[in-house]
Image (cartoon, coloured by chain):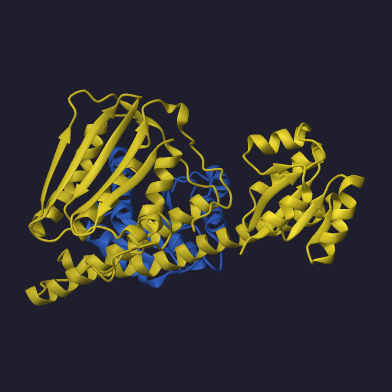
Chain colours: A yellow, B blue
Amino acid sequence: MNTRVIIIGGSEKAIALVDTLKDIKGVDLVGVCDVTLDSPGMQYAHRLNLGTTTDLAKIVSEKNPDIIIETSSSSEFQKILKKITAKGVKVVDSKTAEILLNVIQEKAKEMDAIKSEFITVASHELRTPIAATREAVMLILDGIAGNTPPQQVQYLQIAKRNIDRLVILINDLLDISKIEKGGLRLKIVSCDMKKIIEESLEPTKILAEKNGITLNQTFEKKLPRITCDAERIKQVLTNLLNNAVKFTPKGGKIRVVCRAHPANFIEISIIDTGVGIKKDNIPRIFTRFGQVGSSITRHPGGTGLGLVLCKDIIEMHGGRIWVESKVGAGSAFTFRLPVSKKMIRTRNRIKGVNYG
Amino acid sequence: MAKLKVLIADDEVDFLTLMGTRIQNWGYDVISASSGKECIDAVKSKRPDVVVLDYMMPDMDGVDTLKKIRRIDKNLPVIMFTAYPNFKSMGETEKLSVSSYIPKLSNYTDTLSTLKANIEMIEKRREKKKG
């Protein structure tokens, strides 16, 4: 339950508080109240679509705040404030609020630093034994440890496949944490999207064949060259394609469609005839650990980290990603990338991104 | 010409074993050291043609080991493994002539191919000098 806050006042102090509070997790700025709608603070709040009013009593009864921050001690509001305090709402002056907010932000920075260090160390600790295990298996499979009977080879291949999955998991985890601490960087180059798609399709074709799924692609004749991070886009495509294969039963179809949208976007859709996603689950699907369908699918596994990463990568490019799906019919994952590089954010500066 | 002698130093014993097996399989002689001190002793006594060194070791870190190696042999090619690619620390080692830095990854394949390419390059240079 978020803390609901109302700010009283319309001056520079109020504006500064609005700016600080609107980005803090766990706090809902539900309104700004002043003696006039014309003060700079009120106009600013109005532009941000925050509730603005001169009627303090009304907004308090409507929005039920937990805290009211008073940046101006207007006599008009004193009576009302006395009543409100009696009801248990905390009224705080702006100085106190600033001090507390500074403490909160310092704590948040500390936590970020602790988290980043933990992730870096944990990743190294995890990667070392996984790398050694994988290599030990590879040495045998490569024949360097002598002849290996076929049945042993089979078990070792199972081991190798699962180790490779672990590697991807850990890399995903590290990527997610890099995004969270603002460390993910895009390497922007001019790209041929057709080529990028074809390269991503290569390994998927083999996988699809093994699972009895048909895979085909459609490209619009003229696709503009696009400015993007080719490796990261391939990562997104691979993720979406692997999901499509995972959730499409034998005999099903996967189509990759690429077209240029008139308003200078390139749009790519991955459409499958798989199990589909329940309507209720769709909003959660691009959130961390929002893996859905574990009860429906016969293919457990994965951490659901992939789609969060995909969304972050696409959005850093200034694009959009979404899904349309129907249970029993299939899903279509689509993302759009702007052709121009003006929309691209090469470093992720968003702090406290809400993954919930 | 005699087989190239590769000295590999890393405190992780399994890493030493696995890497050593590969390097031997490529046709080189392998000398193993599991600490900075063992590494220096081996440089003095076994005269390797190239040293592959881990950046972080408990008794003596990679940079100190490298400094000591340079006092013995200014020109001995040294390749460094880094687990944390860290530009600041690489700056310290730049003056000590490191041939190349290879990251340690979850998957040895890339690490190995880069290592092999580097060792082959050093081998070619050695042949040029002697031939």
Residue A236 image point, x, y percent: 32, 46
Q: Nearer the viewer, residue A235 or A32?
A: A32
Query: Viewed as shown, does residue A351 lie left or right of A233?
Result: right
* Residue at the image point whose x is 86% and y is 49% from the top: A77
- A195 w.r.t. A294: above or below: above
Residue A225 image point, x, y percent: 30, 25
Q: Nearer the viewer, residue A193 or A247?
A: A247
Whether residue B18 is visible, yes or no, is yes
Residue A260 image point, x, y percent: 27, 28
Q: Quadrant of the C terminus of chain B?
A: top left
| Quarter assignment of residue A281 | bottom left
Residue A215 image point, x, y percent: 12, 47
Q: Nearer the viewer, residue B101 or A230?
A: A230
Whether residue B49 is visible, yes or no, is no
* Residue at the image point whose x is 36% and y is 43% from the top: A321
Q: Nearer the viewer, residue B22 or B109?
A: B109
Query: Viewed as shown, does residue B88 lie left or right of B120?
Result: right
Query: Viewed as shown, does residue B10 lie left or right of A191?
Result: right
Q: How many numbered markers are drawn?
A: 0
| Quarter assignment of residue B64 | bottom right
* Residue at the image point whose x is 31% and y is 24% from the top: A262
Query: Viewed as shown, does residue B88 lie left or right of A41?
Result: left
* Residue at the image point whose x is 62% and y is 55% from the top: A25
